[in-house]
Amino acid sequence: MNGDQGAAGNGVPASGRLQQLFEGRRLTPTQRRIAHCMVRRAADAPFLSSVELAELAGVSQPSVTRFAVALGFDGYPALRRHLREVPATAPAPGEGEAAPPNAYQQAVRAEIDNLRHLAELLADPEPVERAGRLLASSPTLPVLGLRAASAQARGFAYFAAKVHPDVRLLDESGSMLSDRLEAAARAGANVLLCFALPRHPRELADALEQARGAGLRVITVADSAFAPVAGPDDLLLPAAVGTGLAFDTACAPMLLGRVLLEAMCDGLPDAQARLEEFDARAAARGLFLD
């Protein structure tokens, strides 16, 4: 059976119909693994038992059931019945037409859409400019990011340290995080920059409550304006993540972090001088190959 044809020989490719079914869903990594397996075995998917699909995807059979429920079905039999019964609504690609995008291409295109949406939000630069001024004004700048968001926080902190006199990366949880938040507040911090990406750790919410209790203004780069860790008085800047692969992609949050860096530099009168000093030291030490 051809993997690009629908189970009943209808016009739209089965893989495309599956991708439409999964698109925009908030799935766990295990559930995305099942989704990718179904796309790869699109022609067979409507005829696989839950046990067979679990074996192909390398997951447990209950995970397949939970996957079907996450898609809005009563269980896996209802999902399989849907795949057998849904008719095609678009013609198959004709001679010389481009093939439908595969799962990897769709993930890239979804990220491009996220970046376009971010560009539209930045048509009003006032929230980012206000955040940049707040970041620049804080004598000590703690940057928080746990688990999936730690890479975004680390990237921001790395560059921010070149222009800001006291940047403190907070990317570990537990009692040490609480200690370091207290130390930042005692050192004069009045702002906390937080990167909050799904899945949002419970300990992140606890850390933000501590920061607010210490009088820090929280600026959050989050995947949504409705992120569960956001407080009513926070300055929240949304940037969507991509959900088309087994693990979220965060191109838009990363770019928004760089935009915030630019806005912060605009509020630091000696930012350019600090960058030039760093370049001179780097050249003297031979830090870089180019």
Image (spheres, helix red, strand yellow):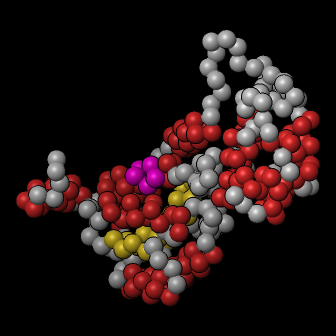
Q: Is residue 128 left or right of residue 108?
A: left
Q: Quadrant of residue 163?
A: bottom left
Above or below, 86 relative to 67: above
Residue at 63% x, 46% y: name it: 244
Q: As drawn, which residue projects farthest toward the left?
A: 284
Q: Is residue 143 left or right of residue 38?
A: left
Q: Is residue 173 left or right of residue 106?
A: left
Query: Residue 122: image x %, image y %?
Result: 50, 44
Is 241 included in the stretch rendered in magenta?
Answer: no
The stretch in magenta equals: 254-259
Query: Residue 219: image x %, image y %?
Result: 50, 64
Above or below, 213 relative to 83: below
Above or below, 72 relative to 15: below
Is 258 included in the stretch rendered in magenta?
Answer: yes
Foreground pick, 177 / 248: 248
Foreground pick, 166 / 72: 72
Residue at 66% x, 27% y: name it: 100
